[in-house]
């Protein structure tokens, strides 16, 4: 990451990028594919870009990492529950609120999810909130994977759910480490992700990115090969692909993710987190930032996360 100012901009870009992808994706979920110009216009006339549970839980991860200067499972679980009960209208699925109620009744932070999802959930709920882990541990891949797994246990304890969170966090970490002033090598990025992940389904999909990058406009094939659903293995590789197909343009990466359909808010949020981590906050349209709900708090939180992660 080198330059400390550059690192700070990447932290800001990643959290704001995640929130913007979430908000824009949520507004398009269930809608037809639209031209980039049409979506830009839709955003322009929006009074406020409101985020969903994806960003709400991402905020909880970042808050807990900052307050504990690292991972504390009981604290992070409590932060999730507290944030949910303060704003339960963020679009949470049926599972996490049940987990939060078990937590409030005194169940252990790493056991409560087992009462809701016997055998564990492999949904993308842990991956969607993993960006702060990738930022905080951007140069410590072993610790990143360990913490991503532990943080996932709070709600998603299936190995594929945990691995999806770790893979998303690693993609953010790799993006932070890259110098956006130089051309990113997608093949090298893919190789490092393949070296990182051990689950066969993720390895197979990440390997497919190489050929798909030759024809990113063939959205039907991209969705067929990578998926666009709520399962972590059907969304994390897709979000990574949206970024790799548009490495130099945050707007295009997010709109491309949205136009793949399916779980648009989560896939666009994860793509936005990676793109923002690579390009930094200055690459994100000012007017988009100004329309983002709670923008100042998210920026301040990202700044605090950067300060703690960099030892300031």
Image (cartoon, rainbow, N blue to C red):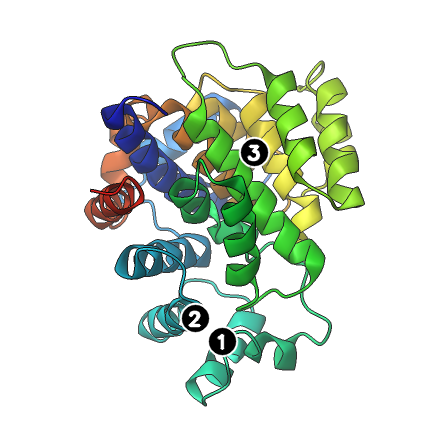
- CB-based contact (under 8 Å), mark 1 and mark 3: no
Q: Is residue 293 above or below residue 57?
A: above
Closer to the camera: disc 2 or disc 3?
2
CA neighbours of label 1 inside 10 A, class few (<14), some (14 to 19), many (20+): many
Which residue in the structure is indicated by mark 1? 109
Report the quarter where the N terminus lies. Answer: top left
Relative to 306, residue 62 above or below: below
Report x, y in % for residue 44: 32, 31
Q: Residue 141: horizontal and vertical position, in percent?
A: 53, 40
For the residues labelled 2 and 1, the Cα–Cα distance comes to 6 Å
**Residue closer to the observer: 196 or 92:** 196
Q: Residue at x 38, y 74 (%)?
A: 78
Label 2 belongs to which residue?
77
Label 2 sits on a secondary structure element that is: helix
Horizontal relation, residue 19 to residue 35: left or right: left
Q: Which residue is mark 3?
A: 257
Secondary structure at badge 1 equals loop
Q: Earlier in the sequence, mark 2 or mark 3?
A: 2
Q: To which quarter of the image does residue 303 belong?
A: top left
- Name the image quarter holding residue 60: bottom left
The mark found on residue 182 in the picture is: none
The residue positioned farthest toward the bottom in the image shown: 105
């Amino acid at each position: 990451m080198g330059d400390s100012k550059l690192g700070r901009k990447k932290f800001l870009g990643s959290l704001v990028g995640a929130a913007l992808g979430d908000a824009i994706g949520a507004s398009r979920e269930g809608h037809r594919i639209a031209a980039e110009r049409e979506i830009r216009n839709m955003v322009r006339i929006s009074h406020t870009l409101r985020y969903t549970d994806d960003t709400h839980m991402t905020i909880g991860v970042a808050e807990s990492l900052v307050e504990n200067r690292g991972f504390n499972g009981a604290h992070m679980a409590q932060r999730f529950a507290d944030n949910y009960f303060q704003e339960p209208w963020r679009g949470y699925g049926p599972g996490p609120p049940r987990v939060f109620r078990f937590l409030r009744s005194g169940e252990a932070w790493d056991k409560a999810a087992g009462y809701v999802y016997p055998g564990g959930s492999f949904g993308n709920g842990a991956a969607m909130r993993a960006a702060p882990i990738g930022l905080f541990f951007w140069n410590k891949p072993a610790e990143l994977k360990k913490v991503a797994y532990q943080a996932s246990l709070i709600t998603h304890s299936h190995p594929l759910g945990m691995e999806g969170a770790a893979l998303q966090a690693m993609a953010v970490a790799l993006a932070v480490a890259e110098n956006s002033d130089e051309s990113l090598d997608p093949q090298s990025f893919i190789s490092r992700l393949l070296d990182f992940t051990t689950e066969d389904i993720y390895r197979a999909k990440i390997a497919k990115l190489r050929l798909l990058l030759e024809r990113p406009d063939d959205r039907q094939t991209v969705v067929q090969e990578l998926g666009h659903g709520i399962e972590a293995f059907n969304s994390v590789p897709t979000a990574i692909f949206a970024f790799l197909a548009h490495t130099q343009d945050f707007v295009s990466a997010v709109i491309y993710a949205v136009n793949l359909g399916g779980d648009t808010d989560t896939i666009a949020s994860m793509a936005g987190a990676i793109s923002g981590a690579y390009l930094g906050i200055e690459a994100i349209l000012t007017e988009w930032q100004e329309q983002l709900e709670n923008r100042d708090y998210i920026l301040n939180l990202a700044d605090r996360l950067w300060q703690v992660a960099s030892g300031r």
